[in-house]
Every structure is written in structure tokens, then in C-alpha cells.
Amino acid sequence: MARGRTVSHEQEAYEAWRYEVERIVAPAYRDRWLALVVALGVVTGVGITWHAWAATDGSGGPGLIATAAGSIGALLASLFLVTRAARRRVFRAAAGVLARDFPVQCPRCSASLEPLGSQRCHDCGANVRQAMGLVVVHLSDAAVRRARWRAAARHRLRHIRPTAALSPPLWLSAAVLMLGVIVAGSGALGASGGRDPLEASPGVPREPAGDGVARAIGDGELGSTPVGETTRRRAPLLIGTQVLASRAGGPYHELAVIVRVREHTAFVVYAEGSSAWVRARDVLVPEVAVADAVEMFDGVRFVPGIIRARLGSALLVDGAWSSVSRMRVRVDATHVGGEGRTSEVPPDAWVEARVDDAWHPGVSVDSIELRQRVVLGDGTGRWFGPEDLRPQQLGPGARVWVEGRDEPHIVAARVGHALAVVAPGGDRSWTSLARVRR
């Protein structure tokens, strides 16, 4: 109320009704910590978007900005619609309360009063004011009088259910949903998030060393054929995700898993067992689909072929089953964008097969009666009987032998096909399913 201005009882009563209706619509609308929640949500949203943009080395900027802007716009629009619908509902309910008759009683002694605008109680002598269905004891202090009008309106509206519109819990939930949409839009890989999956494994190094395995150079590796535009988009750097990563920044990419991120680089473990740091611009989404043009390593060189079928890590390339551990793709090779990001594998297809008194991990791709055809991690495919098969149980705590090493190792953590292993002497390193046996 402005100083020097006289406000009628009807105006005071109207303002009290409106204040209480707004309070029911938005219980915490005037709370200071609501502003803090909104501010933190905006700052966090901008931070997440910037981090995701930086992880893609700037290549996903337009898409990420569009995702973030769309998420924020959808958030504001949904909150506006919820609030408008809640306000209409409460105003209708308040109008119904105003239209109903109610007993006019003295607020001080509860004695019955005549329904007149202003009067004095005959029982207690209180100076009473009536307006818009509200009755209060009149006082000269405007602040106290305003509080009494609001209390009277609150009492009349006590049966109306409060709404969640514009309340801090709703804003916080919406902000969390918005961040989830931004992260999902930036990843689109089924990522586990930005937390290092090995933080809970103190026996695993924070800076894993590579296995130092070199691959033979195939025809065209040196770039004799000009490289065209990539057929797959760049992937964000998110720990625990599967990607296609290049070697030394060349045109060829191999399937890998990100196990560590540092600025604009990622430490990846390739499906064949080696590991290396790669730049963000050399990491693509892991789209390996049927009809894709790929190259398979035959022990000497890479041979071109077409994928005819895929079951998880097992690939049928031009009539022969092999593994993704022996595959590479050229960035401009034939591929339909958006296809082949995942391949469903039945739980019982992940097996271990006995070869020369050792159990090797693999995927069962076919069966005839009791025999199953299994593609092992090293790319070879064989038929096995039930006595030579068992469910795959390669996880933390498993004791394995690593190809090229003389002593057994303990698996400290597993991220997809990547295994963090610890030697008896405490040496720690990364390898993959393609290079271990039990």
C-alpha cells in the first residue's frame, strides 16, 4: 500500500483473495531459494552443454545448442502451461467459494453478525469490517490489517488442494529432466555418464599404459586414395561408451571403448587389445551395420568385404564369421548414417569355449542339434559340443591369462570388451576379451 493513499476495505479484501489464490497456485512462488534453484539449473545446463560441446572438439556445437535450446524452451513452455491450468482451476474454485453463503461471525468472540459492510460486535464490542465474504477486526496498522484479511481468505480457501506449479520441487525435477535430455542428446550412445568407472577400483591406474601391439599396414593405409567425407558423425567423449577410434589420426577406425577422458583426448582400449590416447576429432559413433563396407585382418593384411550379418561382436563378412577385433572401417566407406549403433545379443549367446584346455570368450552365432558355432574373441569361428561350452563369466575378480604374458592376471574392472588387469607383481594395464583366456 502506498503512503498517503487510502485503500477501501473492498480493495484490501480483493488483494487478500488474489494473494491467497496465487499462494495456492505456487506455494513457494515468493521463496528466495526458488530463485537459487532456477539460477543453479540454468548455470548447470549451460555448463553441461559447454562440456558436451568441448568433448566433441566443437563439431557437435549446432546440434548441442539446438538440443539445449529446445530443452530449455520445452521446460519453460511446460511450466507455463502447468501454471496457467493450475491458476484457472484455483480461480474457478475460489469463485465457487465466494458464491456460497457463509455464517457471518465476529472473529474475536464468534457472535453472529448482520451481513453489513462495517459494524461493531454487540457482544464484545470489536470494531469489525466486512468485504467480499471476509470478516476481520479492524486495526489502524495497515500491515497487521493486511495479514488479517489474508488469514480470513486462507480460512475460506482451506479446502482447495494446493498445486505443484512453480514450486521448487517441480522446478528442480524439470531442471534434472532438462539436463538428462541434453546429456542424452549429446551422447546418443547409451553412455554411462562422465564418471570414471574405475574410480572404485584402487588397483587400477589412472593413466593406463598401452599394450604396444602394432597392426600390419594394409593396402591404401598411407593415403594413396584421397579420403572423402566421413559417413559417420563424430562421437562425444563419454567414459564407458563404445566408439570407432582411429590410429595415429589416419583414415581408418577400429571399434574401441573409452575408459578415460582428458581435455580434448580420450584413452581408448581397442577391441583387439591395444590401447592409446586419441583426439576427439578422431572418434566416431560406433555404427557397424549390415551392408557396411569394412576391412578384416587375415593375419597378414586387411581384406575388404561387406557385412552380411552381425550378432554383437561377431560379424559375418562375405560368408565367413569373424570378430570386430579384426575389423576396421574407412571414414568415407559405404554406410547408412544412424544404422548399426547396437546389435542385440541373447544372454545365453555370451559363452566361453574350451580350446586346448583353456576357456576362451566368444559369441554363439549358430547351432545344429547340440553343437554350437562360436566366434571367439580372436576372430576364429568353430563348432563346439555342450561339454566344451559354459556361460561367460569374465568380470572383476576373474583370474585370466593374457596373450603374450607368462603369469595369470586378475580382472579389476570391465568396460564392455575392455578389461583392466593386474599382474601378480602389481603391474596394471588394459587388454580386451580378444586376448584373454581362462
Image (cartoon, helix red, strand yellow):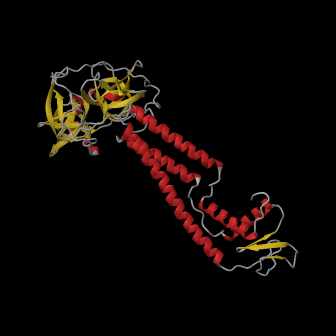
Image quadrant where residue 123 sits: bottom right
Q: Is residue 186 visible?
A: no
Residue farthest along the left direction in this orientation: 319
Quadrant the N terminus occupies: bottom right
Q: Which one is nearer the viewer's eye here, 52 or 377?
A: 52
Please determine whether, in this image, residue 129 is positioned above or below residue 343.
below
Q: Is residue 80 left or right of residue 28?
A: left
Q: Residue furthest bottom?
A: 114
Vertical position of residue 268 compared to residue 114: above or below: above
Residue 381 in picture, x, y percent from top left: 17, 34
Query: Where residue 23 appears, x then y in whole percent?
Result: 64, 60
Position of the C terminus by quadrant: top left
Does any portion of residue 259 appear in the rendered image? yes
Residues 392 and 78: in front is 78
Instruction: Give the x, y percent position of residue 387.
Output: 21, 38
Left or right for 118, reference 396? right
Q: Residue at x 78, y 59 (%)?
A: 143
- Where 55 sits versus 341, above or below? above
Report the side of 120 relative to 303 (left or right). Answer: right
Residue visible at 47% across and 30% down?
Answer: 199
Quadrant of residue 110 within the rendered picture? bottom right
Apparent side of residue 133 relative to residue 55 in the rendered image (left or right):
right
Instruction: Please state the total of marks drawn on the protein image.
Output: 0
The residue drawn where x is 20% and y is 41% is 310
Q: State the image coordinates of residue 426 (x, y, percent, origin top left).
A: 42, 19
- Residue sitting at 62 percent across and 62 percent down? 22
